Image (tube, rainbow, N blue to C red):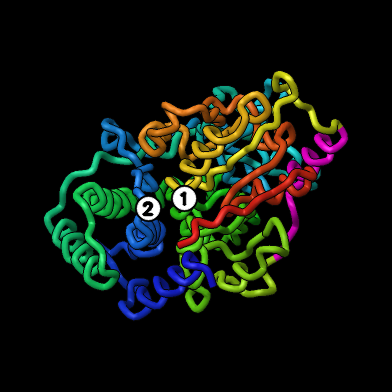
Amino acid sequence: MDKGFEFVKRFAEWEDDNHLFGWKIAKVNIWPYLRDIIGRIVFKKIEKIPYYINYHYLKSNENASKWDIYKYFDWSSLKKADVLFFNSGRRQKIDGKWHSPYLDDFLPELNYSFFVLEPIGNACIVVPPHDNMILFDPNHLAVKIHEDSDITRETYRFCQKLEKDFSIELDDSEKKEISQAIHSIVQNYERYIKLYYAILKIVRPKVLIITMRMQLSVNYLVEAAKMCGVKSIEYEHGMMDIPHNTQRCFAYKKKIATFPDYFWGLSSLDLLYYHYLPIPRENIMPIGNAFHEKRIHELNHMGNKNELPNNMKEILIISNAISTSGLMELAISLSESLDETKYCVSFRLHPEERYIWNKKYPKLNFSKVFVQGINMNHDINYYIQRSYCVVGIESTALIEALELNRRVYVYCRGD
C-alpha cells in the first residue's frame, strides 16, 4: 500500500475516533465541507511537501452581504428540466474553441431536457455555449468573513489537536487558511443553501449531475438537492489520486449530506477507490467519457505530429498538483544532462497550478525546461501527442498517453 493510501486510511480512522462527522459550529455540520482542505494540509505536512494556498473554500466578495440572493441571478433564464447539470468551469482549448470535456459530447446524446449551471472558469467565456445554461461565479455571493470569537476558539483547539495527533507543526499561513475556511463555510452556509434550494425548486429536475465535486459550492448544492428530494450523480472528472481521496474515500460507512447518491466513473481501473465511496456498490458505474474517447480517436488517426525543430524528441513531465520538488528536479536534471540538439524537456502544469507555479517551482524560471499549460492554449492531449515519452507520478494523463501509444514512465521519489 502506498504512502498516500496509508495516510487516507489513517485520516479516516482519526476522523471516526474523534466523531468529526457530528462536529457542528453554529448549527452547521462542518466536517463534510472541511475534511478535504484538512486532508491536503496534513498530508503535505507529513510528507514535507510545500503547501501552496489555492483557496478550496469560497473567496469572499466585498459587496456580497448587501445583496439579496434573489437578485443574484436572472431568474427568468432558469428553465424547468429533467436534468440539472453543475458543470466544471475547466475547459480545454482545441482548434481555437473552448470545449467542456464533460458535457459537450454528452449533451447531444441526452434524450432528456436539461439545464446547465457552470462557474466561470479558465476559459473566461462570457456568452453561454448553450441556450439553457447560466454562467456564474460561485464566489460572487460569498460574504466577507468577519471574525467570530467562538469560531476562532474552536479553530485554535482544532489546530492544536491536528498538531498533536499527527505530530506536525502548522505554520501561520496554514492556521490562517484553516480558520478562514471554517469561518467561510459557516458564514456562507445559509446563503448558498437558500440559493441552490431556490434554483432546484424552479428547475424541478428529476436528477442533478455534477462534474467536479472538489468545488466547495457544489457541496452546498448536493445538500440542497437532498432537502428537495432530488437524486444526485457525480460524473468523475479525473483519476482518483491522493488530492481527492480525503474528499471521496474511506467514508463508506457514513451517510453524508454533501455526497451524491450515484457515481459515474471513468474506468474500471479505479474500482479499488470506488469500493471506499460512501455510496452503495450498485450505484457506482464506470461509464467512460465521450469527449476523451473521441479526442483520443482523432489524435490516433492524425498520428505523431512533431512540430519541434529538427525533429527534436520532447520529454513531457506531467504534474499532478500534489507532488512538487521531485518532478521539478527531475525535469531540470534531464534538461541539463541530455543533448539539447536532440531532446527538449517540457513540464506540463496541472490546471490548479497556473497562477502559483512561479512560487511553487521557482527553479523552473531559470532552467532550460519549457513550462506548458500557463495560458491553456492547448489541451493536455496536444502535448502528449507530439511528445516522445511521458513521465508522471499519478494522473489521468498517463492513461491517455498509453492510449496515444506513447512511452510512459511512472516516476517514484524513492522515499
Q: CA distance from mark 2 to mark 1?
A: 7 Å
Q: Which residue is mark 1?
A: 323
Front one among 80 and 389 = 389
Disc 2 is placed on an element classified as loop
8 displayed left or right of 188: right
Residue 286 inside the magenta-drawn segment? yes
Q: Quadrant of residue 355?
A: top left
Question: From this viewpoint, is residue 204 visible?
Answer: no
Q: Which residues are magenta?
A: 285-301
Q: Amino acid at mark 1?
A: Ser
| Mark 1 Cα shell of 10 Å, populated few (<14), some (14-19), many (≥20) | some
- Residue 156 pos. (x, y %): 16, 61
| Mark 2 Cα shell of 10 Å, populated few (<14), some (14-19), many (≥20) | some
Q: Quadrant of the C terminus?
A: bottom left
Which is more N-terminal, label 1 or label 2? 2
331 displayed left or right of 70: right
Q: Which residue is mark 2?
A: 49
Q: Quadrant of residue 235?
A: bottom right
- Residue 303 pos. (x, y %): 84, 33
Instruction: Mark 2 and mark 1 in contact? Answer it, CB < 8 Å.
Output: yes
Front one among 21 and 16 = 16
